[in-house]
Image (tube, rainbow, N blue to C red):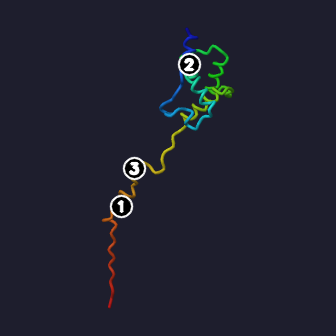
Amino acid sequence: MANVIREKLVKRMFSDAKNYPYGFSRSGDFSISESKALSQYGCLIAALVDGELKAESAEEHGFIEAAFGQREPESVAEKAWVKYQKRINRPRLGNINGTKASSFESDTDSEDMSTDLEIEIDD
């Protein structure tokens, strides 16, 4: 039963429409071999990491150890998964321009800034 599930997970193409809507190969983040390995083994590795499936082979134990940082990734699939996790979990940087109008523009009106100079000239 478990082997049937593993075969289905390996045959199923892994994709992430939220972070990579055009696919891994078109993102520019992954090489061709990495995007193929991620598409092929991504579902299996995700199931192993999430605990939905128990590792039975040395390769599957390698996926788990590399994913949790217990050892350096060795295979292309392990390297691609670690790289994928780093990309989707990186901190999002804020925009320096912001989304609101600056407070300087809203506080200063042209009517308040009018300067009437009174010049007294003695003849």
Residue type at mark 3 is Lys
Q: Quadrant of residue 40?
A: top right
**Mark 3 / mark 2, whichever is N-terminal:** 2
Q: Quadrant of residue 63?
A: top right
Residue 120 is situated, as x and y percent measured from the top left of the image, at: 32, 83
Secondary structure type for disc 3:
loop
Residue 93 is situated, as x and y percent measured from the top left of the image, at: 51, 43
Q: How far apart, in angstroms, are the residues tagged by discs 3 and 2?
A: 48 Å
* Front-lying residue, 77 or 104: 77
**Mark 1 / mark 3, whichever is N-terminal:** 3
Q: Given this view, does label 3 or label 2 mark the residue nearer the observer?
A: 2
Q: How far apart, in angstroms, are the residues tagged by discs 1 and 2?
A: 63 Å
Residue 86 is situated, as x and y percent measured from the top left of the image, at: 58, 34
Q: Which residue is mark 1?
A: 108
Which quarter of the figure is the N terminus placed in?
top right
Q: Which residue is mark 3?
A: 100
Residue type at mark 1 is Thr
Circle on res. 68: none
Q: Given this view, does label 1 or label 3 mark the residue nearer the observer?
A: 3
Name of the residue lying farthest toward the top: 1
Q: Residue at x 61, y 15 (%)?
A: 55
Left/right of residue 70 with respect to residue 17 in the rendered view: right
Q: Which residue is mark 2?
A: 11
Q: Residues within 10 Å of mark 2 (few under 14, many from 20)?
A: some
* Front-lying residue, 117 or 84: 84
Q: Residue at x 58, y 38 (%)?
A: 28
Q: Is residue 50 above or below residue 35?
A: above
Residue type at mark 2 is Lys
Q: Residues within 10 Å of mark 1 (few under 14, many from 20)?
A: few
* Front-lying residue, 114 or 10: 10
Q: Residues within 10 Å of mark 3 (few under 14, many from 20)?
A: few
Q: How far apart, in angstroms, are the residues tagged by discs 1 and 3?
A: 16 Å
